[in-house]
Every structure is written in structure tokens, then in C-alpha cells.
């Protein structure tokens, strides 16, 4: 059962931290994309999906596969839809920009 808690830790780090940090940087560099309606929907889908996925993995770690499975599926689908909307937002609103450091 310990492996499920390791998976939880990895998913929270990668989905909840790394991916959202990257999207935040992109939205900061390209404010038109960050201020769009798609960005707001993407944000809220991630804020709903990541906790659902994390909670389901806690349930998996506790051996509650019957309830954890559907919650995991819902969380994963919500995150996937958010990622698709992020890609659409980027393709629609991000233009070439020279970054000077």
C-alpha cells in the first residue's frame, strides 16, 4: 500500500506543482493568454481535478479501491480537459515573443 502514497507524492509534485508552475510562467510571459477566459477555466479545472486525483490516491493507499477508482477517473478527466484547454489557449493566444534576460 505504501506505493500508492509514493504515487500520490509524485502526482502532486508533477501535476500540482510543476505543470502549474510552467503554465503560470507562460501566462506571465504572455498576459493575453493568461487573462483569457480559457485560462480561467483551465485554472479552475486544475484546482478541482488535482485534489480529486490526490484524494483518490489516498483512498488507494488505504485499500479503498471501490470508491477511489471513480474519483480517480473523474479527477483525471477533469485534469485532461484542463490540459486540452491550456493547449488551445496557447495555440490561440501566444504569439512569438523575444525574451531578453
Image (cartoon, grey):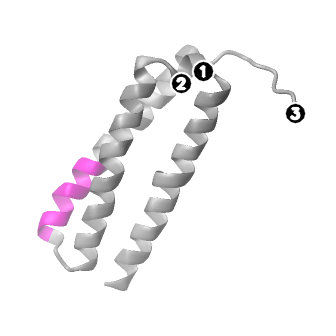
Quarter of the figure with the N terminus: bottom left
Could you say where residue 10 lies in the image, as x and y percent from the top left? 48, 66
Name the residue carrying label 1.
Answer: 31
Label 3: element kind: loop
Task: Using the numbered discs, state the Cα–Cα distance from disc 3 to disc 2 in whole angstroms.
Answer: 21 Å
Sequence-wise first label, 3 or 2: 2
Number of on-image labels: 3
Label 2: element kind: helix
Report the disc number at residue 93.
none
Q: Start and end of the magenta stretch?
A: 66-75
Check the image and report above or below for 87 versus 19: above
**Badge 3, how many Cα within 10 Å: few under 14, some, many 20+?**
few
Side of 50 relative to 67 (left or right) = right
Rendered residue at 13%/65% (across/down): 67
Could you say where residue 45 lies in the image, as x and y percent from the top left? 33, 37
Rendered residue at 44%/37% (across/down): 83
Rendered residue at 12%/68% (across/down): 66
Pick the residue in front: 3 or 23: 23
**Badge 2, how many Cα within 10 Å: few under 14, some, many 20+?**
many
What residue occupies the far right of the structure in this picture? 101
Check the image and report above or below for 2 versus 38: below
Answer whether labels 3 and 2 touch (C-beta < 8 Å): no
Answer whether labels 1 and 2 touch (C-beta < 8 Å): yes
Name the residue carrying label 3.
Answer: 101
- Asked if residue 57 is among those painted magenta in the image, a careful observer would answer no
Name the residue carrying label 2.
Answer: 34
- Asked if residue 69 is among those painted magenta in the image, a careful observer would answer yes
Check the image and report above or below for 10 versus 36: below
Task: Using the numbered discs, state the Cα–Cα distance from disc 3 to disc 1 in whole angstroms.
Answer: 18 Å
Side of 70 relative to 48 (left or right) = left
Sequence-wise first label, 3 or 1: 1
Amino acid at each position: 500500500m505504501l506505493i500508492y502514497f509514493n504515487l500520490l507524492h509524485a502526482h502532486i509534485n508533477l501535476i500540482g506543482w510543476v505543470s502549474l508552475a510552467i503554465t503560470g510562467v507562460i501566462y506571465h510571459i504572455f498576459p493575453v493568454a493568461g487573462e483569457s477566459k480559457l485560462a480561467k477555466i483551465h485554472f479552475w479545472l486544475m484546482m478541482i481535478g488535482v485534489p480529486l486525483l490526490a484524494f483518490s490516491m489516498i483512498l488507494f493507499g488505504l485499500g479503498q479501491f471501490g470508491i477511489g477508482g471513480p474519483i480517480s477517473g473523474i479527477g483525471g478527466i477533469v485534469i485532461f480537459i484542463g490540459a486540452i484547454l491550456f493547449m488551445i489557449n496557447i495555440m490561440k493566444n501566444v504569439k512569438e515573443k523575444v525574451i531578453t534576460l
